Image: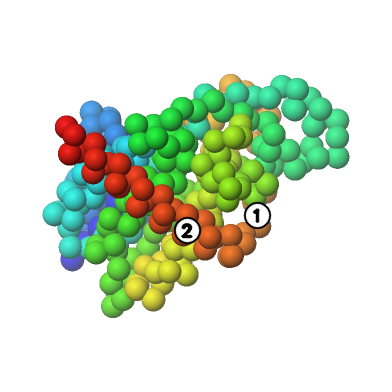
Amino acid sequence: MRKVVLITGASSGIGLALCKRLLMEDDELHLCLGCRNMSKAEAVRATLLASHPTAEVTIVQVDVSNLQSVLRASNELKQRFQRLDFVYLNAGIMPNPQLNIRALFSGLFSRKVIHMFSTAEGLLTQDEKITADGLQEVFETNVFGHFILIRELEPLLCHSDSPSQLIWTSSRNAKKSLFSLEDFQHSKGQEPYASSKYATDLLNVALNRNFNQRGLYSSVVCPGVVLTNLTYGILPPFIWTLLMPIIWLMDLDEGTAEKFYQKLLELEKRVKVNIQKRDNQS
């Protein structure tokens, strides 16, 4: 029986590289591409099948920044599959990243220069927006949309006789100092990406505490500094070539992880009520 692997954000960057690597290791997989853009997803599917004709590659349309899309995709996946063996929670955004030139030059001549380049703390600021669900865009895309996806797919993931695995794409940019339980959506800060990646690391800890006994295990991976569409949006390629040799991650608190998990459960209840109201009005 083929193992089923779901990858969000599978049409470019880390997600696409992951698809190719998985099929190189085992072309008998059933690979399900979770993508927003169906035309890009179809092109990726065709490319993967051309290289690995014995693989089974399907697509589910999902936008993790839109909870109605997440709920639709979850229902579709539950109709298609009896279980999911691996889910790579990879989709993410860093909107309009801006390099803080002042912080860069002041950091170059301080004792924090290595720390600055290894974590990017203080270097990158982002302007973001509110989603249709009334949430901060980076938080919903990188964290909460995936959290709801996991919650909805519990019937496919929780099998104690044959465990399933969640794998989150984290980042060197994940910083404890930029995350706050009082503002876990990071609506008051200027580094929502770093906050969201630390939030995924916390959520990973909480998921293991709450789901391991039910046969679901969670891990985070940091791909390091990778030149994708996200990083090229920050600096041109030749600058990254100079910085690559310089570029380390991290300090997690289990108590904070569990409190954050409970806050996400509370938020889940509220947003589902709002979605139900919108559906009833339409």
Q: Residue at x 75, y 27 (%)?
A: 103
> Could you tell me residue 224's position as x and y percent?
57, 45
Query: Residue 66: percent from the left, percent from the top?
Result: 32, 37
Q: Position of residue 256 (x, y in %)?
A: 58, 60
Q: Quadrant of residue 132?
A: top left
Camera-near label (1 vs 2) is: 2
In the rendered view, tell whether residue 281 sits above or below residue 73.
above
> How many callouts does the rendering have?
2
Determine if residue 92 is in view. Answer: no
Q: Quadrant of the C terminus?
A: top left
Looking at the rendering, which quadrant does residue 82 occupy? bottom left
Compute the Cα span from label 1 to label 2: 19 Å
Quadrant hosting residue 37: top left
- Name the N-terminal-most of marks 1 and 2: 1
Q: Nearer the viewer, residue 66 or 241?
A: 66
Left or right, 4 with respect to 100, comes to: left
User: Element under label 2?
Assistant: helix
Query: What kind of element bears circle 1?
Result: loop
For the view shown, which residue lies furthest in the left direction?
Answer: 79
Residue placed most toward the observer, 182 or 61: 182
Task: Name the amino acid type tagged 2.
Answer: Tyr
Q: Which residue is mark 1?
A: 250
How many residues crowd around disc 2 within 10 Å: few (fewer than 14), some, or many (20 or more)? Answer: many
Question: What's the mark number on residue 261?
Answer: 2
